[in-house]
Image (tube, rainbow, N blue to C red):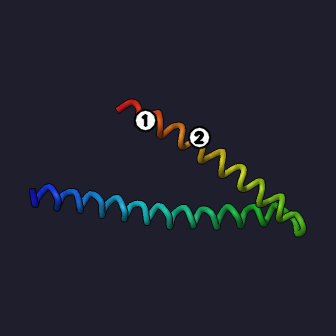
Amino acid sequence: MFNEAKEAIKEKMATLMLAGFGLVAALAWNDAVQSLFNAYFPQGQEVLGKFTYAFLVTIVVVIISIQLQKIVKRK
């Protein structure tokens, strides 16, 4: 029983660490893409750039979510 709990804790810790690294990577990409949009949308059009960015990110997240659901259902 102790070994099972120990293994469960190890798995949970690994999952949490990977989630943390994923968050760091996501924040880095967020900053990079925002900088790209700021370079292509001139001064005064920041709102349009932000909405475009939010729209594109939403589309990407929806596509990834759908693909992940398909993968999970296969197992």
- Label 2 and label 1: CA atoms lie apart by 13 Å
Q: On the rendered structure, is 8 left or right of 34?
A: left
Q: On the rendered structure, is 55 left or right of 60?
A: right
Position of the N terminus by quadrant: bottom left
- Figure check: 11 above or below 68: below
| Mark earlier in primary sequence (2, 1) | 2
Taking depth in this image into account, of 23 and 35 the one nearest to the observer is: 23
Taking depth in this image into account, of 39 and 56 the one nearest to the observer is: 56
Residue 20, horizontal then vertical, whole percent:
43, 65
What residue is pinned by disc 2?
A: 63
What residue is pinned by disc 1?
A: 71
Q: On the rendered structure, is 19 left or right of 55?
A: left
Q: Secondary structure at mark 2?
A: helix
Residue 64, horizontal then vertical, whole percent:
54, 43
Query: Hey, which residue is sitting farthest top in the picture?
Result: 74
**Label 2, residues with CA under 10 Å away: few <14, some 14-19, many ≥20:** few
Q: What residue do we see at 23% from left, 61% from top?
A: 10
Disc 1 marks a residue whose amino acid type is Ile
Taking depth in this image into account, of 40 and 71 the one nearest to the observer is: 71
Q: Which of the 4 image quarters holds residue 21?
A: bottom left
Disc 2 marks a residue whose amino acid type is Ile
Q: What residue do we see at 87% from left, 63% from top?
A: 45
